């Protein structure tokens, strides 16, 4: 101190005898605050090498599926390639998981050809991502192609966004009640999307069954083209608005079920079905 004033210089100079307690309390507060933030920021990386070696999370055996058994954030850092149509790529066995595909591809051995019917071979039980029965699951930002079963199985209270599901033997995206937003589902052997909740901003085309099969859902702003069955099959009185359905169901009715709650385009008509 000089002239009765505390020398300016920041946090360190505040630690005069009269302010020791303040400094200790502030330091403890910062430690308590920063450590949880750093812990929350941890993202577990998944790639082909780690999948083959196993132990991505406790109980994850070498090879596929990669088992995610702990809540948290996960990100692909390479493509994942599965060679058996009956093998799932990623199995989520816990709640509260965010999986960022990182723009990468989960690829299986199945190929589908367009037509009526859509033919897929080989078909099997292996899914790209399976979180069946789990809660609070998020899958974003990537592609699932060529799985023998479904592309993504979302569980319930989930979010699937910005994902391309292509040429899978079963449905493209499957889930209970959640959010399915801004995805593309193309040339899957089953439905493009089969889900409940909010289905919005998706593009579904050339799928072997319905473009969208919605259960008690709000279906907003989607586009469905050239699907073998309906563009939208709405079960249990859901609502739909601001969608475009065209060339589905052999140019027959584009929609079955549900309540038209706003403007839609069904083929050349603005009244559905």
Image (tube, rainbow, N blue to C red):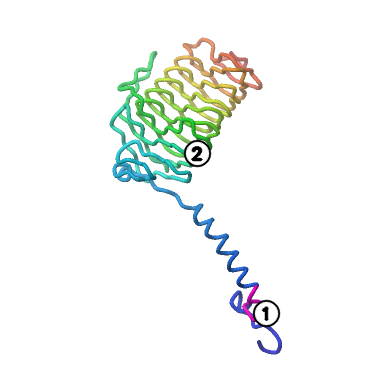
Seen as rendered, the residue at the extreme right is 4
Q: Residue at x 49, y 21 (%)?
A: 211
In front of the other: 86 or 251: 86
Q: Earlier in the sequence, mark 1 or mark 2?
A: 1
120 sits to left or right of 21: left
Quarter of the image containing the N terminus? bottom right
In front of the other: 112 or 266: 112
47 sits to left or right of 195: left
Q: In the image, which residues are magenta?
A: 15-21
Q: Does the magenta stretch include residue 18?
A: yes
Q: x%, y% of residue 142?
A: 42, 38
Seen as rendered, the residue at the extreme front is 59
Q: Mark 1 points at which residue?
A: 18
Q: x%, y% of residue 21?
A: 64, 74
Residue 11 position (above or below residue 46): below
Q: x%, y% of residue 182?
A: 52, 33
Residue 127 position (above or below residue 138): above
Q: Name the residue under label 2.
A: 95
| CA neighbours of label 1 inside 10 A, class few (<14), some (14 to 19), many (20+) | few
Q: How many numbered marks does the figure carry?
A: 2
State the image quarter where residue 81 is shown.
Answer: top left
Give the secondary structure at mark 2.
Answer: loop
Residue 230 position (above or below residue 12): above
């Amino acid at each position: 101190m000089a002239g009765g004033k505390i020398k300016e210089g920041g946090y360190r100079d505040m630690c005069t005898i009269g302010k020791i307690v303040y400094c200790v309390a502030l330091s403890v507060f910062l430690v308590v605050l920063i450590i949880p933030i750093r812990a929350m920021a941890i993202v577990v990386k998944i790639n082909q090498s780690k999948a083959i070696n196993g132990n991505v999370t406790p109980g994850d055996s070498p090879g596929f599926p990669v088992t995610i058994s702990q809540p948290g954030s996960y990100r692909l850092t390479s493509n994942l390639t599965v060679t058996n149509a009956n093998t799932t790529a990623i199995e989520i066995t816990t709640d509260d998981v965010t999986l960022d595909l990182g723009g990468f591809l989960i690829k299986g051995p199945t190929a589908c050809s367009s037509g009526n019917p859509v033919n897929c071979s080989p078909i099997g039980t292996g899914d790209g991502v399976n979180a069946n029965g789990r809660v609070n699951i998020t899958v974003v930002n990537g592609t699932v192609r060529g799985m023998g079963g479904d592309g993504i199985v979302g569980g319930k209270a989930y979010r699937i966004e910005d994902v391309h599901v292509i040429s899978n033997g079963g449905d493209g995206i499957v889930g209970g009640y959640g959010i399915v937003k801004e995805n593309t589902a193309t040339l899957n052997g089953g439905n493009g999307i089969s889900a409940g909740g909010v289905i919005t901003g998706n593009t579904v085309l050339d799928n072997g069954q319905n473009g969208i099969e919605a259960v008690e859902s709000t279906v907003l702003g989607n586009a469905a083209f050239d699907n073998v069955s309906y563009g939208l099959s709405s079960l249990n009185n859901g609502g739909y608005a601001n969608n475009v359905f065209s060339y589905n169901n052999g140019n027959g009715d584009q929609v079955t079920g549900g309540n038209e709650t706003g403007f839609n385009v069904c083929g050349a008509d603005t009244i559905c079905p």
